Amino acid sequence: MAYTTVRNTAMTFFLMLPLTACTTQGTPAMIQDLDAETSMLLFSDEDNISEEKPYYRALLKKSNNCSNDDIDIKIVSSGKKDMVDYLDVTGYPSLYVMEGQELKDKYEGSTESSEIETFINQYINCDTSNE
């Protein structure tokens, strides 16, 4: 009888193990690695790089005026399905603002560098004397 109890307990444990693994794997590793600071995630589609130039220009301009501690920029490929699905990305290019692991805002509007810069400036504050 003790053998049956041990076997049933072991079976229950192994049946539940995959369920616990699913809950920890729900959040992509890139999201889990974000700290409490503000991060910019640029979702990029390799087939439309020319449309992304204004985003790169705006992010580069802001990055040049900030220290490494002030701005965290990550480029995320459209092929990174875990990220695309997790944040429900529907268009490219698009810029997502994260505070820690929480989505704060997203930009999918005009491709004018000045409008993208205005959006970025709402969330990233640093020395702007060179802007």
Image (spheres, rainbow, N blue to C red):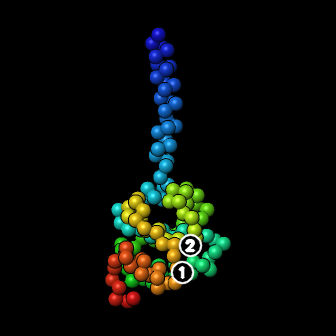
x, y percentage for residue 18? 52, 37
Seen at 42% across and 62% down, the residue is 103
Q: Quadrant of the C terminus?
A: bottom left
Is residue 67 in view from this perspective? no
CA gap between label 2 and label 1 equals 9 Å
Label 1 secondary element: loop
Label 2 secondary element: loop
As shown in the figure, which amino acid type bears the numbered disc 1?
A: Thr
- Crowding at dot 1, Cα within 10 Å, few <14 / some 14-19 / many 20+, comes out as some
Residue 6 vs 40, above or below: the answer is: above
As shown in the figure, which amino acid type bears the numbered disc 2?
A: Pro
Seen at 49% across and 35% down, the residue is 17
Quadrant in which residue 104 is drawn: bottom left
Q: Which residue is mark 1?
A: 111
x, y percentage for residue 34? 41, 61
Q: Earlier in the sequence, mark 2 or mark 1?
A: 2
Contact between marks 2 and 1 (CB within 8 A): the answer is yes
Is residue 81 found left or right of 117 in the rendered image?
Answer: right
- Crowding at dot 2, Cα within 10 Å, few <14 / some 14-19 / many 20+, comes out as many
